[in-house]
Amino acid sequence: MIDGLEPEPPAAAELFGEHIGGARLFTAALARHGEELGLIGPLELPRLWTRHVLNSALVAPLLRPGRVGDVGSGAGLPGIVLAIMRPDVSFTLIEPMERRVAWLERQAEELELANVTVVRARAEESKLFDSLDQVTARAVSALRTLIPVTAPLLRPGGELVLMKGAGVDGEIGAAEKVIRKYQLHDVEVLVLGEGVVSEITRVFRATAR
């Protein structure tokens, strides 16, 4: 047991199913090294499972087999968590900071995630990520800033699946111009995890033309 780490919630085994072993290994590694590497804050261990790992896991059913980009993957939330849960999906984890890239590569290797590619880059600067089927991101920036760096990565008909906080409806209002500019349609907010976990997840979902 790692000092201060939140005990595994009962919902973890329910959500991860046969992949719970990988989730446990990843959570333990993040608990041991996350603060020293600047991946998580010093107050996150007592809520690491609930606030971060399960929060990310709830998005897995929204993904389709294909190519998914995770922008600003950082600690691997949600990218590594989703890759553990969805071996049928090919993930490109896009992260500009060298030490975080090294962490992501190490986790992909240690967890034997053959469906993960890690690329050191800023999404808006790179030409490597066109024609993705879906793009996700978590806790990166407001929608009016995030949409211009994520929407161009999608193929026509591709989908944004962006994890957001309680203020997402206000962000949508502030992002109306960029939503129109990037011709996003079927814009919706999904609330995930009600009755399953103690902290729900909100997702902004939209489709590119």
Image (tube, rainbow, N blue to C red):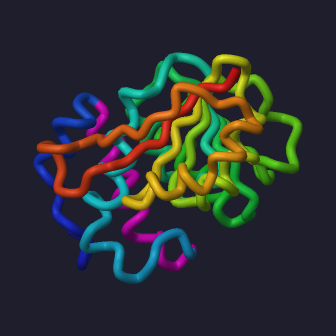
Residue shown at the point (35%, 53%) measured from the top left: 53
Q: Is residue 176 left or right of residue 54?
A: right
**In which quadrant will I find the C terminus?**
top right
Asked whether 131 or 4 is in front, the reply is 131
Residue stretch in magenta = 19-37
Quarter residue 179 falls in: top right
Q: Main secondary structure of the magenta part?
A: helix
Image check: 20 left or right of 158?
left
Which quarter of the figure has residue 60? top left
Q: Quadrant of the N terminus?
A: bottom left
Is residue 125 within the magenta segment? Answer: no
Q: Given the current orientation, which residue lies at the most extreme bottom position?
A: 42
Question: Residue 157, how many percent across, how many down?
Answer: 65, 17
Horizontal and vertical percent for residue 38?
56, 75
Above or below 10: residue 32: below
Residue 176 in the image: x percent, y percent? 63, 46
Picture residue at 25% right of the left edge, 73% below the top: 46
Viewer-closest of 146 and 126: 146
Name the residue at 61% across, 61% down. 141
Which one is nearer the viewer's eye here, 208 or 113?
Answer: 208
Task: Identify which residue, 52 or 35, lies in the foreground.
Answer: 52
